[in-house]
Amino acid sequence: MAGAEIDVKRSSAYEMIAMDDAVSVVLRECEKVVAGGNQKDEMVGLNAALGRVLEQDAVAQVDLPAVPLSMKDGYAVRAADGPGEFPVVAQLNAGVDARTLETLPERSVAYIATGAPLPPGADAVVPVERSAAAESGGDRVVLTHEDGSVKAGQDVRKPGCDLKSGLVLPCGTLLREAEIGLLASIGLSTVRVKSVPTVGIISTGDEVIDVHARSAGEPAAGGAAFDSNRPMLLSAARAVGANVLDLGIIRDDIESVREALERAADSCDVVVTSGGVSMGKKDVLQRVLSDLGTVHFGRVCMKPGKPLTFSTLTRRDGKHTALVLSLPGNAVSSFVCFHLVVAPVIRSLAGLSPLVPVVNAVLDQPLVLDKERPEYHRARLSWDLNSQRFVAVSTGAQASSRLLSACGVNALLKLPAADQTLQKGDIVEAMLLYSQL
């Protein structure tokens, strides 16, 4: 039986706000969560530290290197001895304990490998290319020098030339591969880092079915649709560095939605839902969110993704606040909204800079602007060597249901609302989605 038409929503209860304002609201609430102590720290090994943020000062106990080391394969010498023929009294390889080395006698040299410590008394290295076996034979070598002299410190890594003992990386440093290598070089195998947020992903809709519930390749029947949003959003959150929880699909009824949201808020720092925020009779998510917590906004002036909703819920233990980002059900709207608001939340809670770079790009083709709303147009950027500029190529039809338009993209073009057409060669702003172009 059809429902009473008097109950149909004819307009939204929420004022439409600008995208920049929406991001500001979300990040403000992130700051409150961090200030409230929701986010903890943890100890991890270096193999698990990539992309994490230090929650300690990393301190070197000694200079690096701690002793003089050879920069080249060659001969350790006393610089004052100059060029000439010398006996080779030792062979020094990398890894030898500098504390066991004997003093180099005057008018003698020691063969030395790259990275080996210099013996006491030696203050320079002559590269093997500047040497020759002595005609007299035996363990003797002739050393020559381009300018006729050897300078003290020549081809020697001096103690502390790489780093001095003391602070190496301050608390708050983002750990990339070089930083992790540096931590290993000072002997740290574990470090204290800021915890990453736990993000729960929920899909909503009576028509939505789990792709794993059917045999591979079997089509969805009737009006059903495979849930593409949940796998996509789980992958996106994982790629940004979050711990993710798959919270499944919930039906379009108030009790199911309420129970799922309360359970998700109890176990997650961030809850991401897709669907249920539009104007349909069964779009009950905003109603439940307003009953359980605070809805900060429920409409954003953007295309695609206008029904984007942001709420905060207090966990049932009363101790922590969960951030709830409710994305529209259309797959492309979910994709765009994730990158605009969810990814900044994850980065912010993990201690990272929340926003990604925006660059100027040249359009490769004309684009018709939307008259009413700014659009986040999916595109592929590449660097043109001739013009020394980024070039943006549209992914084609931009319907919010056409997920193909998001495949292979690395940028969202920020197109203004206007009754006009941008021309090929016009400059637009492009928000970079990934670190690789």
Image (spheres, helix red, strand yellow):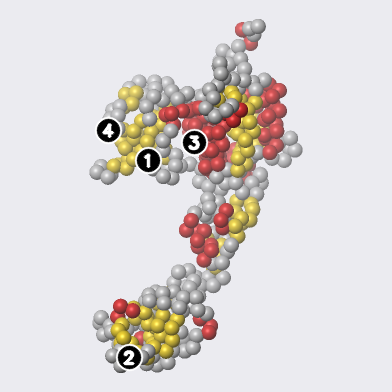
Residue pointed to by mark 3: 339
Residue pointed to by mark 1: 359
> Does dot 4 land on a helix, a strand or a loop?
loop
Eye-nearest disc, 2 or 4: 2
* Mark nearer the N terminus (4 vs 1): 1
> Does dot 1 land on a helix, a strand or a loop?
strand
Q: Is residue 314 visible?
A: no
Eye-nearest disc, 3 or 1: 3
* Mark nearer the N terminus (2 vs 4): 2
Q: Is residue 220 left or right of 411 when viewed as pictured? A: right
Amino acid on which disc 4 is placed:
Gly
For the point 52% across and 42% down, the residue is: 239
Which numbered circle lies on residue 137?
A: 2
Eye-nearest disc, 1 or 2: 2
Amino acid on which disc 2 is placed:
Gly
* Mark nearer the N terminus (3 vs 1): 3
For the point 55% across and 45% down, the residue is: 241
Quadrant of image for the N terminus = top right
**Is the Cβ of the residue at disc 4 closer than 8 Å to that at disc 1?**
no
Amino acid on which disc 1 is placed:
Val
Eye-nearest disc, 2 or 3: 2
**Is the Cβ of the residue at disc 1 closer than 8 Å to that at disc 2?**
no
For the point 74% across and 35% down, the residue is: 316
**Is the Cβ of the residue at disc 2 closer than 8 Å to that at disc 3?**
no
Amino acid on which disc 3 is placed:
His
Quadrant of image for the C terminus = top left
> Does dot 3 land on a helix, a strand or a loop?
helix
Q: Nearer the viewer, residue 302 or 13?
A: 302
**What crowding class fits label 2: few (fewer than 14 Cα within 10 Å), some (14-19), or many (20 or more)?**
few
